[in-house]
Amino acid sequence: MSAIHDLGYKRYVGTRRPTSTRWRVIVRRQMATAWHGWFRMKAAVGLAIVTTCVFGGMMYFLTNGIMFRGFRRVGDLPLTIADGALPASLDWYRRAAFLLGLTVIAGAVAGDRQSGAFTFYFARSIRPRDYVAGKLGGALAMTASILVLGPLVLALLRLGLCDDTDALVAHLAIVPEALAIGALATLVYAIVPLGISALFASRRYAVAVWAAYWLIATTAAGRIGIATGSSWIAALDLARAIEAVTHRLFDLQLAHHLAIPLPAALGSIALHVALALAIVGYQVARAQRTGVGGSA
Amino acid sequence: MTAVIELSGLAKRYGAITALAGLDATIDGEIIGLLGPNGAGKSTLLKCLLGLVPFDGEARVLGLSAARDGAAIRDRVGYMPEQEAVLLDLTAVELCAYAGELSGLPRNEAMQRAHAALYYAGLDEKRYQPIAGYSTGMKQRVKLAQALVHDPELLFLDEPTSGLDPRSRDEMLELVAELPDRRGCAIVLSTHLLPDVERVCDRAVIMHKGALRFTGTIDELRGARGRDSELAVEVKADAHKLADALVGAGAACRVQSDTALAVDLPADATARLVFAIARDVAVQVRGLEVRRDSVEAAFLRVIGDEGAHP
């Protein structure tokens, strides 16, 4: 028999953290776990840092150059690299966010279902809404660190490149614009993969479905929309929907681009986000009822 | 003093299926064995006690209403599930500290108690390794530690020795048996292994088909009918002679050898009857003890012929 070890046990008599704040513990743990290893959050953050450096370098060194890839202002006016680098960079930040979805977010709830962690959570005073808030908070914070922070740095750099106060004031709007589009994209790239994650009890399946949904399903919807000339169907391609909002915010046009109306773009985003939230909420509440002490 | 668990008309239905059929009981003790065949309602009872599912009637745990104070109950109760229910990406110390924080402990306190709980559970340096690489026995120890870390007053242990080799099982039972003294917590032990109950539990609750079939001490369970009426008698010789005399007094006897017989006393009789008759027929009694069933036999008797596996 092994000896029983005990380290001078004393009952805890201090105060306990209120139940309503325990979702923050889940946020913190989710971020700490995501930061482990090189192929989770660090890979996505690395891509975001490279994006910031490349586009920031372009803004700094090629300030007055003309934008490439058909980026024009509305009215077919040319766009300088200093002004066009930020909206152009969003494409790459979104790739980093998609990578984060693959490596971290799409597996977040599915991994917990797979490992039986719902029992771990719900045998404690964690309510389904605490769990959802924790997972959601973690996903939003991680995604925002890419999609909000990166563009914000570029926006501030753009302000720093202004020659005088008048130019600075004229460009001040770029900061809220960057924050707005970053926040909108954050909602999509954090919540949609989380919703897909809640559909499966296997991390691998959830990741595969998130990749397939993003790369195949929404892209197909976008192409069908373009082929049929239906901007509402094209708006189901979330990347195009975000792009449409970006163009509207930054007053841009793309020569080859089917114009997706703002209501269609925002409607598609709102629909996806609402559906994903509903899936997460429903699945987690169901898991709480069945997950502890067997499936009776 | 508040009972650990109080049930009053506790009922739970899933559609047409009655999972719990109006349970009434006051359950107390240090280590309480919860027994019953598959589908007896143990899991449903557990969910009701933790305040996770709505139910009819009243259930109180540590004096708190399970219907209204589920979250407060879960802060004061630890749960060690049978199935794997850990976060495999974490190390044992990270998991236990996380469990402590989720139960409301401040971060530093949770970390200190995580180390203490893992030390108690016998995970020394291994506590810094990811749980994914642990053996079954080590995972059981982690599950016990995470249930202990927030300092519960009541522990629900679901099959704590499941999948363990004999030595690990011994060690786990030793840890469980020591918990009430060392941590001041009561334990509800749900297990299929009746020898485990016999070894560590002082009370038992037996469920079958959603109803409580027995609540009481292990001695009462083994002592069968609530009174010491079944005796094993050892005599110097002439067991047949004593048996004949006892049958004449209304007892049922089975002679096992010339020196041993089993006696089932008539109602209202006590062991004094055996001594009195032995004196009358001049048979020397050398030993007399109340016959006890094993917990397994008692369990089978309580639930009847159905559901022989708890």
Image (cartoon, coloured by chain):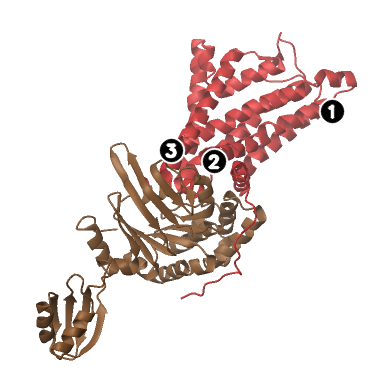
Chain colours: A red, B brown
Identify the secondary structure beneath mark 1: helix
The reply to whether label 2 and label 1 mark residues of one chain is yes
Which mark's residue is nearer the viewer, 1 or 3? 3
Look at the picture and state if A59 lies above or below B216.
above
Which quadrant holds the C terminus of chain A? top left
Query: What residue is pinned by disc 2?
Result: A131
Q: Position of residue A42 (x, y in %)?
A: 64, 43
Identify the secondary structure beneath mark 2: helix
Q: CA distance from mark 1 to mark 3?
A: 51 Å
The reply to whether label 2 and label 3 mark residues of one chain is yes
For this orientation, the residue located farthest to the right is A164
Q: As rendered, which of A48 and A238 lies closer to the eye? A: A238
Q: Kindly identify the amino acid type of the residue bearing the numbered disc 2.
A: Tyr
Query: What residue is pinned by disc 1?
Result: A160
Marks 2 and 3, the one that precedes in the sequence: 2
Q: As rendered, which of B196 and B291 lies closer to the eye? A: B291
At x 12%, y 74%, the residue is: B250
Chain letter belonging to callout 2 = A
Query: What residue is pinned by disc 3?
Result: A286
